[in-house]
Image (tube, helix red, strand yellow):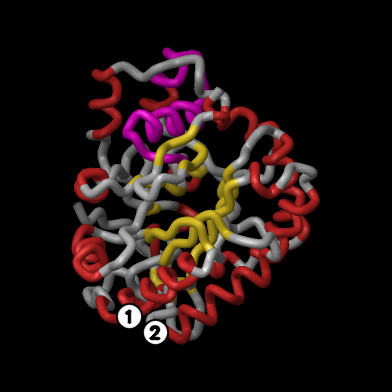
Amino acid sequence: MILNETFPLADGTSIPKIGFGTWLINGAAATQAVMDAIAAGYRHIDTAWAYGNEKEVGEGIRRSGVPREELYVTTKLHADFKTYEAAKQGIEESLARLNIGYVDLMLIHAPQPWNKFREGDHYQEGNLAAWKALEEAQQAGKIRSIGVANFEPEDLENILKHCTVKPVVNQVLCHISNTPQKVIEYSQKHGILVEAYSPIGHGAVLQNPELQAMAKKYGVSVAQLCIRYCLQLGTLPLPKTANPAHMKNNADVDGFVITDADMETLKTMPTIQNYGEGAGFPVFGGKINDDGTLTSRDFVKRD
């Protein structure tokens, strides 16, 4: 069963092949969703400083009844923390909110602050400062593994050139109709596992007639096809839902294999241009304004 399988990481640890994402699940719903996911067999839980739900996720983990050492927990350092002191404080804040003893994996959430995401400046010095804080927290035993998210090859190269500990994970937006091939290839070439967030395209691909037809051919749901696709790319999917039935459905991807021909078709599908309700978020092409509001924009693929 895929929920019991792991990927090896370059630092000698291992990570469950499917994770449970918690973005946009907040308050008591986040606690319940984490408990439901663990009850459904998930052993890998993903959160972030910026999600605003670390406290509730930690509570769900503690209340799950599953021993801490049997769970794999990821959180992310806020993308805005681009000094050593800010990163060091952010790490401590995440650890305190989660209150689960240690974190299995912590990532720099993005190479740029969210209101400057993909606007040209790669914040190389700031990322190196944040990375130093992560390395020290790992050495102190507070974090087991360290990595990055939303990093492009230029961002990864900066870390790899100057680090003491190499990143073991790069978590990126990856799904059918938006597959960042260059990022995947560069990461894998350097022994960095790629995690795929929003593997179902924030729901934007579910009504695609071509995907519906292919899913029907395999006797699965579109969501299952999407998650299987990510696994066959060698990436680790992080589906998100608060619905227990969907949690189980998302993990039920053992019974079929996408053919090579169909994988090629899926890899070359036209890039999605609009993420609907999600179009205001920077990772989907949108813009966070200085006052915190979101401006929706079409998505422009970068590789």
Task: Decide if residue 124 is on the left or right side of residue 104.
Answer: left
Label 1, label 2: how many angstroms apart (C-alpha)? 5 Å
Task: Decide if residue 18 is on the left or right side of residue 123.
Answer: right
Q: Amino acid at mark 1?
A: Gly
User: Where residue 200 sits in the image (x, y, percent)?
Assistant: 46, 40
User: Where residue 262 sits in the image (x, y, percent)?
Assistant: 29, 21
User: Where residue 171 sits in the image (x, y, percent)?
Assistant: 39, 53
Task: Decide if residue 37 is on the left or right side of residue 13.
Answer: right
The segment highlighted magenta reads: 213-237
Residue at screen point 24% across, 18% down = 261
Q: Is residue 39 part of the magenta span, yes or no?
A: no
For marks 1 and 2 on the same chain, the one whose residue lies earlier in the sequence? 2
Task: State whether residue 131 appears in this view.
Answer: yes
Q: Which mark is residue 126?
A: 1
Residue identifier under label 2: 83
Q: Is residue 60 above or below residue 179?
A: below
* Marks 1 and 2 close (CB-CB < 8 Å): yes
Q: Amino acid at mark 2?
A: Thr
Residue at screen point 48% across, 28% down = 222
Task: State whether residue 298 appears in this view.
Answer: no
Residue at screen point 22% across, 74% down = 120
Q: Is residue 255 above or below residue 280?
A: above
Q: Quadrant of residue 95?
A: bottom right
Camera-side residue: 71 or 209? Answer: 71
